[in-house]
Image (tube, rainbow, N blue to C red):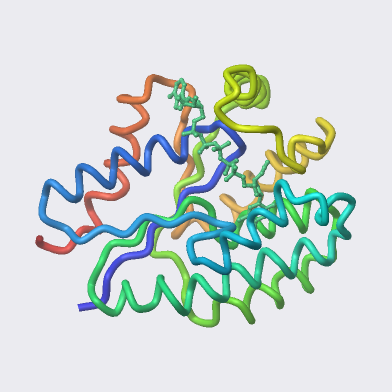
Amino acid sequence: MQGLLITFEGTEGAGKTTQIERLSCRLGEMGYQVRTVREPGGTPLGEEIRTLLKHHPAGRGMSSEAELLLMNASRAELVRKVIRPALDAGEIVLCDRFYDSTVVYQGHGRGLDLEQVERSIAFAVGTTIPDLTLVLQVPLAVSEARRAARLGLGSEPADRFDEAGREFFVRVERAFEDLLHRHPDRMHAVDAVDTVEAVQRSVWSWVEPLLPSA
Ligand code: Z5A
């Protein structure tokens, strides 16, 4: 039996990683085989690309076109080496960002031509399309505050995306709204301002109906 691919999207600090960890635990306790991956990254090659995209000095000032292709290079590897084999083995794959982020960040955020962005995504993923995409939504001010708190704690260094101006993140926020309207069957908004437990309940309400019997 083919597995399930569930992707989590949303602005920085919306709580994707937190919710994926909780969902993964819950599904694991129920007896499902669960695989969690992140983008960019998720394979040895992808993690190297992630470093280039986020922190490596060689990535400073990179062109938007190179950024688009690196995101898709990481994704092409992840899809072929991890996601498809896991789905073929009947696993539930939880992915922290996937190609919707490319439409939003490289297309709308960086302003690249949307048709070219979509063609490059199609080349990277082929027929591998999520069964469900949850877009965790928090107002920009909340995203900024959560990100600032984390940077202040020193748990993670600032990355190249932290350098983008506020306007960039406003475009990102609007682009997620636009995608939600364009893909109402696959993509659903989750209000992520509430407590972690309340958000977890909303996430579960979308995931549970898709689960095969364990
Ligand atoms: N990117 C791209 O441009 N194009 C692409 O195709 C792809 C990605 C795939 C990846 O960065 C960057 O790559 C990203 C987009 C770009 N950059 N930006 N902007 P990343 O993986 O490092 O970061 P992220 O994906 O944006 O995730 P994040 O910042 O780690 O946020 P999160 O996973 O959504 O949130 P979290 O880590 O679960 O929680 C953040 C904090 O909030 C943490 O302290 C939590 O304890 C707290 N939290 C979580 N939930 C709550 C609730 N409900 N209440 C209060 N506090 C909470």
Q: Which x, y percent locates residue 6?
A: 39, 57
Q: Position of residue 203 (x, y in %)?
A: 34, 40
Identify the residue at image location x=48%, y=53%.
187
96 displayed left or right of 139: left
- Frontmost residue, 144 versus 177: 144
Quarter of the image where one finds residue 114: bottom right
Please state if 140 lies on the left or on the right of 35 as rendered: right
Does 210 sit above or below residue 196?
Answer: below
Q: Quadrant of residue 53?
A: bottom right
Q: Position of residue 96 (x, y in %)?
A: 48, 51
Q: Quadrant of the C terminus?
A: bottom left
- Residue 191 is situated, as x and y percent measured from the top left of the image, at 46, 30
Depth check: 169 or 164 in front? Answer: 164
Q: Residue at x 85, y 55 (%)?
A: 111
Q: How many marks?
A: 0
| Quadrant location, the N terminus | bottom left
Q: Residue at point 49% right, 54% down?
A: 38
